Image (tube, rainbow, N blue to C red):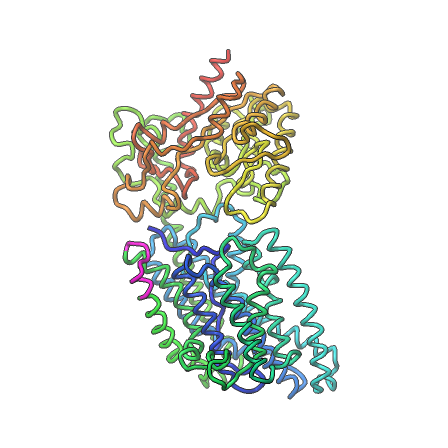
Amino acid sequence: MTAPVTTSAAPATAAPARPAATGHGGFQPEIQGLRAVAVLLVVVFHLWPTQLTGGFVGVDVFFVISGYLITAHIFREVQRTGTISLRRFWARRIRRLLPASLLVLALSAAATVLFLPPTVWSDTARQIAASALYVQNWALAGDAVDYMAQDNVPTVAQHYWSLSVEEQFYLVWPILVLTLVALTGRYAARRANGVRAVLAVGIGALGAISLVWSIIATAREASTAYFVTPTRVWEFAVGALLGLGVVGTVRGRVAHVLLGGAGLIAVITAGMIFDGESLFPGWIALLPVLGTAAVIAAGYSGTPLTPGWLLSRRPMTFVGDISYSVYLWHWPLIICVPYVTGVDLRTVDKLGIFAATLVLAWLSKAYVEDPMRRQRTLSAVPWRSFAFAGAGMAVVVAGTVGITTELDRRADAAEASAESVLGDDVFTTAGDDCVGPAAMEDGCGAPEGSDELVVPPEVVVEQNHAATYPGCQQGITTPDVKTCTIGSESETPDRVVALVGDSHTTHWFATFDALGRERNWQVITYTKASCPVTHARRLLDNEQTDEAGDSCLAWGREVEATIAADERISAVFTSAFSSAYEFADADTPLDDPAADGFGSVWQSWSAAGKQVYVIRDVPPTRGDDSVPDCLLSHPDRNDCATAAEDLPDDPQTAAVDEVADPRVHLVDLTDRFCDDSTCYAVVGDLVVYRDTSHLTDEYARALAPYLAQQVDAAESAGD
């Protein structure tokens, strides 16, 4: 059982709302109602993602509101004093935001240890720490382009990315305004029109640059662009221009209804029509952003049934008042409840989470947010607010350090266990004691084993974050060739071989490192995330642009030519997650793009005198269920196994048959994963997979003798 995930291009959350709304010096109840719309969009999206596929646009609504309110507040202070007190500004933000956010983070850390499986502790601790330091959006942006992190399940702190963006805005924005004010001169700064013009030009220019950046970055890498701050600055800038009064509120009932109604419809429409395939934020974010701006510009109208009147009704303003705490509480509940109940979220669970979120939000606003905001000891002197912030962050981060320290202790114990069982040389221990792939031999009893796991799931899963061979796999969108050398460290190896393919080749690194050391082979790796070497274009349903496919083709061509021209390389070993892709024609038409694309590459290496060994891909696991998570959730290891009859067709295996080249050989180790009925998640007390499809280092290393046997057999047949 896994926690629910969002269906957007990246997980979307509500940005922090504020408990009060003060625009040009007066209370604006319609702003609170607009906050309610925004937070409800996000909460409903997270609870019912298939029903409101674009609810993540609530984030953008909050960003515009924040730009509007904060800039209006700063502008009034400049008009009064000619400057801005940064200390007082930041101290107020701390008292308003940090008490509730740090409380939820601390309780989320405790809930993680109490209710969540240890396989998610590491990710959760890292993201809680990043959230406490308000850099969570950058941490998630890094994960978005980290192929090894793409199977990570959502954490209880994942929604803090938008709060991090806002805090970065609060940190930088007053400095930007102060700099622009300084350009006007102190006397001119007291003149509203003078400072307004300078601020409008500066903020407008910054917003335009950010919008262009957002459009370009989203087209190139939408998953990263979703999180990073520069792609979101223009949304704050739109609100800021409203806050400066550059665009005044409209007058007249008809204008109010038309503008406010059009804006509200735009926001709700965006929530309904956008989905995970939308290139967001980019230019399409103009719909909810300009819609929000229109509602704000329309202002309040006391006329019944007009947009401002509807947004100002007490139910809407109540939700708007507590929207910040709603934002904080709803996501940890969504993550934790399935682990507590043992089943995926049901309708009754979702309704319960919604109700609990409102109750917790009201309690935290009444007893944490408001009291701390007015707390005299903190508000009397700004530095006390800063001290509180530092102490609170330190406490939360210290809690995450405690979690990771416990995981490190378990990892050290597991490493010692693996060393005692597998030893330094798997070739001398192969077949001993029915451990690992040796358990598939007759006479070993149950293939999955019956003793304690040599390496527990919570340690295995760490291989997704801390690669054993770091820096050896090229990124998805970078076409440049990256190589590493593993295996023998001798200056005069007996043989030089190439290891080529996507991430389902990188999980063989431990195998070939052991094999190379045993046989004095130097192994040169050529791997790239999600990129098999083929003359066909590989296609993935979840890719929004052609950039990754173009990058794969360019990379593959260079790898093919480099290996063919390298006279040192006598053999090429290649593998790929080939069943995960669709294939289409690229540079030249192919009768069967899936098989012919691979085969034509192998024949070019064969023509260059290389032996080509195609390693059949590993058997599939249970779809989206991470094997380590599954093992912790199910006492019976075979609950995480799959049926042997579900083995997919492997395009590379078919291509070997079609090529029929004596230099192209198939290496098939399926019998070390499966018997006639079952493909196992644990074999001989070794966990086979570290996530949903990649081998653990321990199992890959233990497979080295069996791979060597098949290579020897192929070479003997060739002789």
Dividing the picture into quarters, in which one does residue 75 lie? bottom right
The x, y position of residue 375, in whole percent, is 44, 83
The x, y position of residue 421, in whole percent, is 34, 34
At 54% across and 59% down in the image, what residue appears? 227
The x, y position of residue 321, in whole percent, is 44, 78
Task: Verify whether residue 151 appears in magenta.
Answer: no
Question: Does 603 sit above or below residue 446?
Answer: above
Q: Nearer the viewer, residue 694 or 421?
A: 694
At 54% across and 18% down in the image, what residue appears? 661
Question: Does 61 sit above or below residue 577?
Answer: below
Q: Is residue 67 visible?
A: yes
Q: Left of 588 or right of it: where is 153?
A: left
Dividing the picture into quarters, in which one does residue 42 lie? bottom left
Magenta residues span: 342-351
At 41% across and 59% down in the image, what residue appears? 51
Q: Nearer the viewer, residue 628 or 467?
A: 628
